Amino acid sequence: MPQAVTELPEYTLVRSRRRTLALEITPSGQVIARAPLKMSRARIQAFVLEKTGWIQAHLARVRRQNQQAAQAGKLTKEELSNLRRALEPVIRERVHFFAKALGVSYGKITLRCQRARWGSCSASGNLSFNCLLALAPPEVRDYVVVHELCHRKQMNHSPAFWREVAALLPDYPARREWLKKNGPTLLARLIDE
Ligand SMILES: [Zn+2]
């Protein structure tokens, strides 16, 4: 870990057919720079250097969250399957409730214990939810359900999409913020694959 703020932070460069340069910090605290195929190394380094403060603040947060998670303990396979079992009827009920309110249909509902995401909605309307939502407050769970169901109307995160979310949950920004802040601590309780 670099000590001085002016030192270039360690990062992994991943090039792909994208147009913009972006930084990402993984749950394990790895810094990834995603860059277009032909962007010069110098430009990428300058960008990373410029973002040093941001990187260090985020790394500190990730470390703190992983520490908290370590204190709370990793969840065993049995605990996870109990969480999933407890959550399933709740999610089904909330999906049913909010789908009706939105006037949308949906397909299969799957619960997964995974680090990658809190929920997803496929083009055909199959929904998946993270079983760690069992450890989140009910209003946050509802936000994830509403978020995924609104994708039945808008398959994107456009202003129109957020208007749909806000129509049902006017206070969604606070719920979303909770997930941003506390979500990583929950996710870190999953056993590393
Ligand atoms: Zn979404």
Image (cartoon, rainbow, N blue to C red):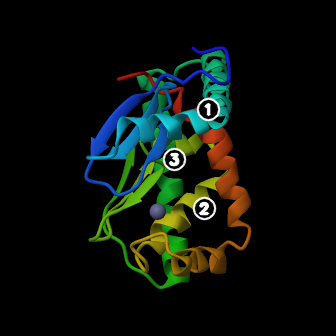
Neighbours of disc 2 within 10 Å: few (<14), some (14-19), many (20+) = many
Say the numbered circle drawn on residue 87: 3
Neighbours of disc 1 within 10 Å: few (<14), some (14-19), many (20+) = some
Say the numbered circle drawn on residue 143: 2
Q: Are marks 3 and 1 in contact (CB under 8 Å)?
A: no
Label 1 C-beta lies within 8 Å of the nearest ligand 1 atom? no
Earlier residue among tags 2 and 1: 1
Q: Quadrant of the C terminus?
A: top left
Amino acid bearing label 2: Tyr
Q: Secondary structure at mark 3?
A: helix
Amino acid bearing label 3: Leu
Reading the image, the residue beneath label 1 is 52
Q: Secondary structure at mark 2?
A: helix
Comparing 102 with 27, the one in front is 27
Residue drawn at x 31%, y 62% as measured from the top left: 108
Question: Gap in Å between the C-alphas at discs 3 and 1?
Answer: 40 Å
Q: Quadrant of the N terminus?
A: top right
Comparing 9 with 129, the one in front is 9
Q: Quadrant of residue 139?
A: bottom right
Nearest to viewer (mark 3 / mark 1)? 1
Q: Secondary structure at mark 1?
A: helix
